[in-house]
């Protein structure tokens, strides 16, 4: 086990290279780890993380005013409380369920089939850069009803926004760059919102504009913040989860073989991927009052980071937590995409991810489509696996070789749906 020295830092290059190496030591030797450079506390034990995410009075989301609002151009759902939160959350849930979700799944299938097609005869693809990342952006643009011809511009603005919310510290120059991206994204979105208010369509933006719950409706500022939030939340973790799922399956050939024989095991494989390597590693909160964890006092007003990756590998919550096992009985796959999930990849409590059902449908659809193709896949010769990110974390690339396919019937059924080109 690594020793946590007094000069150990989660901001070090060493930690960034492989945080998983340090999680057990953090949980055992420094479960409330203070980082003076950013005046924040890092919690790594499952019970402590769960307590922070469920005790909403003691641990608030107020820190998002500085961590998210400047680039979201308004308050996001996670910042809201009480009746306003309940009403607006219901509006967003409605945007990701029922017929809306069915249309979104069709868009996922269509985009995935189109994006993978050129790689089939080549038998070679980088699952992150050539497939997963553009897919995540295309799908999100379709869900929002935005024009895909602008995708590179929107993706560039989005990466500035994502950099802001997922950085633990930013230089003044980077901060300015991120804020500029956000301002330009807002300037691009506001005319779209106004147009959708006049002529609503079937897309999420139109729905957010017109929906009302208990007399509470969304303002332009709310809609802008939510769209930017959806853009970040549906894009940032999606390619990472997909690439991590296939990486773990390729690294565990016997489990890959089982999933290929019986694709009903896919949800379990996805849930275990989310537990084992959650794409969102940190969730920030603010201590409203002084709090004690493992005998250590966190002062009132402190910023507290829940370490999701460390909590998901706590032996107090999961048996043999460092083993990837899609059959593990303690995961409770059936609950893994609900409020009762045992893993904490979607957070937990009142602010648990509102896009969970969409995320599940998206990754299941794409994974089912790729599975027959990648059954025999292996890492491309010379490929060196590497991950980056402390806040959101995932593979830099995943270069795979597979048996070339010249006439794969990808276009059956679901791909005949609506596509907004
Ligand atoms: C701005 C890290 C992309 C969310 C936050 C309130 C966003 C919120 C998350 C995830 C993923 C982002 N937080 N999704 O951790 O909507």
Image (tube, helix red, strand yellow):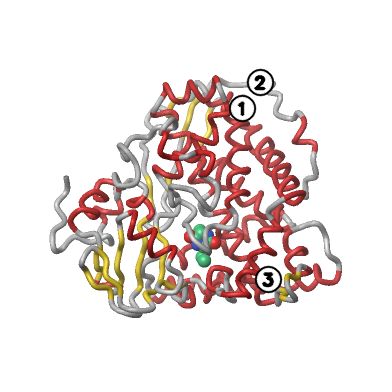
Q: Is mark 1 within 8 Å of ligand 1?
A: no
The residue that disc 3 covers is 223
Horizontal placement of 275 versus 127: left or right? left
Label 2 Cα neighbours within 10 Å, binned few <14 / some 14-19 / many ≥20: few
Classed neighbour count for the residue bearing mark 1: other residues with Cα under 10 Å, few (<14), some (14–19), many (≥20): some
Write down the residue under mark 1: 120
**Viewer-side label of 3, 2:** 3
Horizontal and vertical percent position of residue 274: 46, 44
Q: Quadrant of residue 397?
A: top left
Q: Residues within 10 Å of mark 3 (few under 14, many from 20)?
A: many
Circle nearer the N terminus (3, 2): 3
| Disc 3/disc 2 C-alpha distance (Å) | 44 Å
Q: Which residue in the protein does label 2 denote?
A: 406
First in residue order: circle 3 vs circle 1:
1
Q: Is residue 280 above or below residue 415?
A: below
Q: Nearer the viewer, residue 108 or 17?
A: 108
Q: Is there a contact, CB below 8 Å, between mark 1 and mark 2? A: yes
Callout 3: SS: helix
Q: Quadrant of the N terminus?
A: top left
Task: Please name the residue shown 66% across and 71% down the image.
Answer: 224
Q: Camera-side residue: 172 or 395?
A: 395
In this view, the residue in front, 239 or 77, is 77
CA distance separating discs 1 and 2 = 7 Å
Q: Residue at x 85, y 71 (%)?
A: 198
Disc 2 residue lies near ligand 1 with CB under 8 A? no
Q: Relative to residue 343, is residue 231 drawn left or right? A: right
């Amino acid at each position: 086990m690594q020793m946590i020295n007094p000069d150990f830092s989660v901001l070090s290059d060493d930690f960034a290279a492989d945080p998983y190496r340090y999680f057990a030591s953090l949980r055992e030797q420094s479960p409330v780890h203070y980082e003076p450079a950013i005046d924040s506390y890092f919690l790594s034990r499952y019970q402590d993380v769960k307590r922070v995410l469920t005790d909403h009075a003691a641990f608030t989301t107020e820190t998002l005013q500085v961590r998210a609002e400047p680039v979201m151009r308004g308050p996001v759902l996670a910042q809201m409380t009480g009746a306003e939160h309940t009403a607006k959350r219901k509006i967003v849930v409605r945007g990701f369920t029922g017929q809306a979700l069915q249309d979104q799944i069709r868009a996922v299938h269509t985009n995935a089939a189109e994006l993978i097609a050129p790689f089939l005869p080549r038998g070679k693809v980088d699952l992150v850069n050539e497939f997963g990342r553009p897919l995540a952006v295309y799908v999100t643009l379709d869900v929002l009803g935005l024009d895909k011809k602008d995708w590179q511009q929107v993706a560039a603005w989005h990466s500035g926004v994502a950099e802001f919310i997922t950085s633990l510290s930013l230089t003044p120059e980077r901060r300015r760059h991120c804020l500029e991206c956000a301002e330009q994204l807002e300037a691009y979105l506001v005319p779209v919102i106004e147009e959708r208010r006049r002529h609503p369509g079937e897309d999420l933006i139109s729905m957010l504009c017109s929906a009302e719950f208990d007399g509470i409706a969304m303002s332009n500022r709310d809609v802008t913040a939510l769209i930017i939030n959806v853009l970040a939340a549906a894009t940032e973790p999606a390619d990472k989860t997909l690439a991590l799922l296939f990486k773990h399956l390729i690294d565990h050939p016997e489990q890959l073989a089982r999933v290929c024989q019986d694709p009903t095991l896919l949800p379990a494989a996805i849930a275990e991927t989310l537990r084992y390597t959650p794409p969102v590693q940190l969730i920030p909160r603010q201590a409203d009052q002084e709090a004690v964890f493992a005998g250590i006092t966190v002062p009132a007003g402190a910023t507290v980071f829940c370490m999701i990756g460390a909590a998901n590998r706590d032996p107090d919550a999961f048996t043999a937590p460092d083993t990837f096992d899609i059959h593990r009985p303690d995961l409770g796959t059936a609950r893994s995409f609900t409020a009762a999930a045992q893993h904490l990849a979607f957070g937990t409590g009142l602010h648990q991810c509102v896009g969970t059902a969409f995320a599940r449908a998206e990754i299941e659809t794409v994974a089912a489509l790729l599975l027959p193709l990648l059954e025999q896949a292996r890492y491309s010769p010379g490929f060196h696996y590497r991950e980056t990110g402390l806040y959101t974390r995932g593979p830099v690339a995943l270069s795979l070789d597979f048996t070339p396919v010249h006439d794969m019937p990808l276009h059956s059924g679901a791909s005949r749906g609506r596509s907004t080109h």
